[in-house]
Image (cartoon, coloured by chain):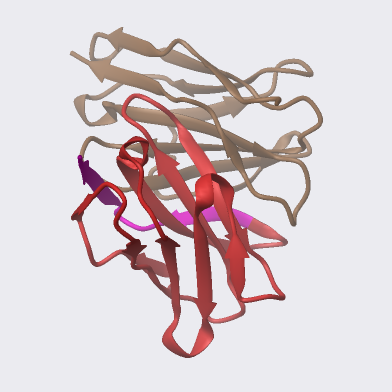
Chain colours: A brown, B red
Amino acid sequence: EPEVTQTPSHQVTQMGQEVILRCVPISNHLYFYWYRQILGQKVEFLVSFYNNEISEKSEIFDDQFSVERPDGSNFTLKIRSTKLEDSAMYFCASRVTENQPQHFGDGTRLSIL
Amino acid sequence: AQSVTQPDIHITVSEGASLELRCNYSYGATPYLFWYVQSPGQGLQLLLKYFSGDTLVQGIKGFEAEFKRSQSSFNLRKPSVHWSDAAEYFCAVGSFSGGYNKLIFGAGTRLAVHP
């Protein structure tokens, strides 16, 4: 069964550094998402992406965050200058159409030192 | 605003016992509802979904859930729990913004299974 793939599984970065989290959504999917889960807290929506543009973003998704679909297969989340509070598990998700569920990757655990 | 409440943070059951995990939602229209399961170190796996129609939905791994509009609930059930069901379970509602555009999750219920 096709799945969403995220790399790396764990990323350790110094505070203030840029980080890029990578995702390969399921190939025929059209809608893409990033969520995050701070340890011990609920999963929170960050951003949704469709037709090469952001369709919705949360308050968390400030100017330090950006997303990109640089080619036909990858979907990336960039954090320009990481903060300690960015430490979390980041999940990528995709879905094929509006009335289908989102499929999640295994996540990237981001640790900011 | 849309929200999801999972009243039970931790639940412990014995293997073979029945299970019910509670979920209540707040949403203005007919919701899209989901249950996801997260095993340690893993991503979120979809167990089942409700979009419309039959209010009792069947999912994978022997799970089912019932949508009750009058109670704003979407409780997850399993008649006989297996040790491998130990995981964290998340209820979520799909928020509409031109189709459902994001998921709003509950805080999760961590299930422990005793042999």
Position in image of residue B6 (x %, y %): 30, 64
Is B89 drawn above or below residue A10 in the view shown? below
Tell which of B104 and B35 is nearer to you. Answer: B35
Left or right of A32? Residue A38 is: left
Number of numbered discs: 0
Residue at the spot x=52%, y=54% of the render?
B103
Dominant SS in magenta: strand
Residue at the spot x=47%, y=37% of the render?
B44
Residue A98 occupies quadrant: bottom right
Q: Is residue B108 magenta?
A: yes
Quarter of the figure that contains the C terminus of chain A:
top left
Tell which of A53 and B92 is nearer to you. Answer: B92
Position in image of residue A38 (x %, y %): 27, 37
Quarter of the figure that contains the N terminus of chain A:
top right
Residue at the spot x=42%, y=63% of the render?
B77
Left or right of B68? Residue B55 is: right
Q: Is residue B3 magenta?
A: no
Position in image of residue A18 (x %, y %): 39, 12
Tell which of B113 and A100 is nearer to you. Answer: B113
Tell which of B88 and B32 is nearer to you. Answer: B88
Left or right of A53? Residue B38 is: left
Magenta range: B101-115
Residue at the spot x=27%, y=46% of the render?
B15
- Work out which residue is located at the far bottom of the displayed protein and give it: B70
Position in image of residue A106 (x %, y %): 47, 25
Left or right of B35? Residue B4 is: left
